[in-house]
């Protein structure tokens, strides 16, 4: 895959034809892993997430890909942006958007399980980036791309122990930040 990425970056269109099925399969695997953590009935499906990411990847064609790990690191960032933007649009629609007002009692009946507040998570990740950009990359790769500890270590070129430590610290920091409403 690294050879194909390098060839595509150098302008070889034939490399893109060979790369597309491999990339699509891997992106779909990443998207399915992430979407498995979302609430049931989420309107964004794994295939739509993959298609959005793929369209954005076409726009970054000028990038000189170093290897497979760098490529999927970029994919993780793209998926994060797509998911956060989608969540922000949904939140906007929930605050009006032509929806029928629902009483408190009705809301209690139809409210589903608690889900991740992606816009708040994104804001917290941006705050964490000022302190520890690597921890943010670990969160992007583990949470948004669904990579394993081993895969994340490969992408970041650090040890698996470092990934585990960064993942643990980032989760604690983010939990505190989200609980305190951004005051941490």
Image (spheres, helix red, strand yellow):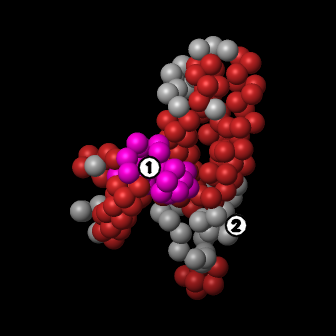
State the residue position of label 1.
153
Whether residue 99 is visible, yes or no, is: no
| Residue 27 sits in quarter | top right
The range drawn in magenta is: 135-159
Q: Position of residue 28 (x, y in %)?
A: 69, 48
> In percent of the image, x 24 and y 62: which residue is there?
183
> In percent of the image, x 36 and y 65: which residue is there?
168
Frontmost residue, 159 versus 97? 159
Check the image and report above or below for 130 versus 172. Answer: above
Residue 64 forms part of the magenta stretch: no
Check the image and report above or below for 90 versus 101. Answer: above
Answer with left or right where residue 9 lies relative to residue 121.
right
Whether residue 22 is visible, yes or no, is: yes
User: SS of the residue at dot 2?
Assistant: loop
Q: Residue most toward the top?
A: 11
Spatial CA span between label 2 and label 1: 32 Å
| Residue 62 sits in quarter | top right
First of labels 2, 1 by sequence position:
2
The total number of labels drawn is 2
Q: Position of residue 7 (x, y in %)?
A: 62, 19
Crowding near the residue tagged with mark 1, few <14, some 14–19, many ≥20 C-alpha atoms within 10 Å: many
Crowding near the residue tagged with mark 2, few <14, some 14–19, many ≥20 C-alpha atoms within 10 Å: few
Q: Quadrant of the C terminus?
A: bottom left
User: SS of the residue at dot 1?
Assistant: helix
Per the rendering, the mark at residue 41 is 2
Frontmost residue, 3 versus 37? 3
Check the image and report above or below for 77 versus 114. Answer: above
> In percent of the image, x 70 and y 66: which residue is there?
41
| Residue 11 sits in quarter | top right
Q: Position of residue 143 (x, y in %)?
A: 50, 57
Magenta stretch, main secondary structure class: helix
Frontmost residue, 51 versus 42? 51
């Amino acid at each position: 895959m690294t050879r194909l990425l390098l060839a595509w970056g150098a302008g070889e269109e034939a490399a893109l034809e060979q790369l597309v099925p491999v990339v699509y399969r891997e992106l779909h695997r990443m998207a399915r892993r992430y979407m498995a953590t979302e609430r049931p009935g989420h309107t964004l499906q794994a295939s739509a997430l993959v298609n959005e990411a793929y369209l954005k990847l076409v726009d970054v064609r000028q990038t000189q890909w170093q290897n497979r790990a760098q490529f999927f690191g970029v994919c993780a960032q793209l998926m994060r942006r797509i998911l956060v933007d989608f969540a922000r649009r949904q939140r906007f629609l929930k605050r009006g958007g032509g929806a029928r007002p629902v009483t408190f009692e009705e809301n209690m009946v139809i409210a589903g399980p608690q889900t991740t507040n992606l816009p708040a998570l994104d804001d917290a990740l941006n705050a964490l980036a000022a302190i520890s950009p690597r921890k943010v990359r670990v969160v992007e790769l583990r949470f948004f791309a669904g990579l394993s500890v081993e895969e994340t270590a490969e992408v970041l070129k650090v040890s698996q122990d470092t990934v585990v430590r960064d993942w643990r610290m980032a989760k604690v920091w983010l939990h505190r930040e989200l609980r305190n409403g951004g005051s941490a």
